[in-house]
Image (cartoon, helix red, strand yellow):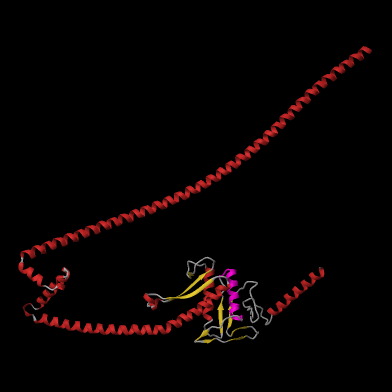
Amino acid sequence: MLNIANNHAEAAKTKLQSIREKSEKYRETLEKIMDEEVQLTMSKGQEAINYARSIDSLRQLHTSLITVSLQYIEAKSDHEELQARNVDMMRRLKEKENEVEAATRAVKDIADKYTRAVKRLSDAMNEDAAFLAFYNAMPDEEKERTPDELQGEIDSKQARLALLHEGDPTLIRTFEERARTISRLTERVTTNESGLEQLEASVVEIREQWEPQLDSLVSKISDAFAESFLRIESAGEVVIHKAGDEGRDFENWAIHIRCRFREGEEMQTLDSHRQSGGERAVCTIFYLMALQTLSRAPFRVVDEINQGMDPKNERIVHERMVDIACGTSVQRPEVDGKALATGTNENGAGGQLSQYFLITPKLLSGLKYVPGMTVHCIASGEYMPEKEGAVSFPGYLKKKLALLQNRGGLIGAAA
């Protein structure tokens, strides 16, 4: 029994030693695997860093490629423009060269013509001593006459000879009648020229009287127009376009409205191309307001002045209209040297005596309202109640105010 137990013990010891050896091998293998894992992790991190660097390099190269592409497009556009300009310049140069060649040929032809004429004249003078003596005896002013003048004189003499040919009385009467007609027309031209001078003098005199008045009137309109634009941090003016030489084309005189809505821009004449629809509407309304400051009227009616405007321009126009109709800072304009009267309306607000009626289907919220303004709401249509007094805007307002007060009291109590 003891031997069996010893054998079992030895076998167990051997098995334990084998297990320990395997465990040691497994531990070494595990450590080796863990070391390899660490190495792989470090290698993976380095690869990630390298990948990020590659991505950054690729991004920089892509940006450089875009920049170079844009530079290429700009250079190509400049090259095409220069080519077009070069073609145009070459065409113009060719035209000028052709003009120079044509002018050179013309000058050469004229020079040859006069050279031949001088040679013929010299030969004739040398051959004819009598003609030479006659030429030397001619006055200097006759010698200076051009060939065209001499030819005209020859044609005139020939025409007179033709009229006197064979003593035709009809031709002589025709000549005398034409001479009398020419004399009458000459007197009429002289009379008309004198009358024209008198008319021009009269025009100048009348213009000196009314043009300064017109300039002064337009200047006042321009001042009122500019004041409206100054309040919206813009600029505007009204000027007279005086057409023609020295402004004599009175038929085409015109009023030009000029404005500027943005800082740094130049004044532009109002038309349908430069300004937007809202800007044109503001200019038109400010111009009408400037005109109204120079006219007497018990009241003014403005119908749907805010239709088609954006909210910003509608607020600008509404506020300016309120300032003009109810404001105390409105400058009193002058007409015929006398200032227009100003007064206080029934609500105690200062302003001009004329009233403004603004008719509109809608208004923005939060507009400017001051004492002296009255709001009328008109309700009509097929769905109106038949009972008179069923629609009461003051009653609606009282109910609304009561609801707001109750809401405020509830909120205060809850607080």
* Position of residue 319 measured from the top left corner of the image (x, y, whole percent): 60, 75
Q: In which quarter of the image is the N terminus?
A: top right
Q: Is residue 360 visible?
A: no
Q: Position of residue 189 (x, y in %)?
A: 25, 82
Residue at 34% x, 84% y is: 201
Q: What residue is drawn where x is 17% and y is 59%?
A: 112
Instruction: Return the residue nearer the eye: 72 or 164.
Output: 72
The chief SS type of the magenta part is helix
Task: Give the quarter of the figure containing the C terminus.
Answer: bottom right
Camera-nearest residue between 152 and 358: 152
Q: In this view, does 274 lie to the left or right of 413?
A: left
**Could you say which is closer to the camera, residue 252 or residue 246?**
246
Q: Where is residue 234 in the image (x, y as percent from the top left)?
A: 55, 70
The residue that appears at 65% across and 35% down in the rendered structure is: 47
Q: Does the magenta stretch include residue 254?
A: no
Q: In this view, does 81 lie above or below 364?
A: above
Q: Which residue is drawn at 52% across and 65% down?
A: 264
Residue 182 relative to residue 327: left or right: left
Magenta highlight range: 308-327
Figure label count: 0
Quadrant in which residue 105 is drawn: bottom left
Q: Quadrant of residue 2?
A: top right
User: Is residue 37 among what the camera can see?
Assistant: yes
- Taking the magenta stretch, the answer to whether it contains residue 318 is yes
Residue 309 lies left or right of residue 369; in this view the side is left
On the image, the x and y values in percent for residue 179 come to: 16, 82
Q: Is residue 271 above or below residue 42?
A: below
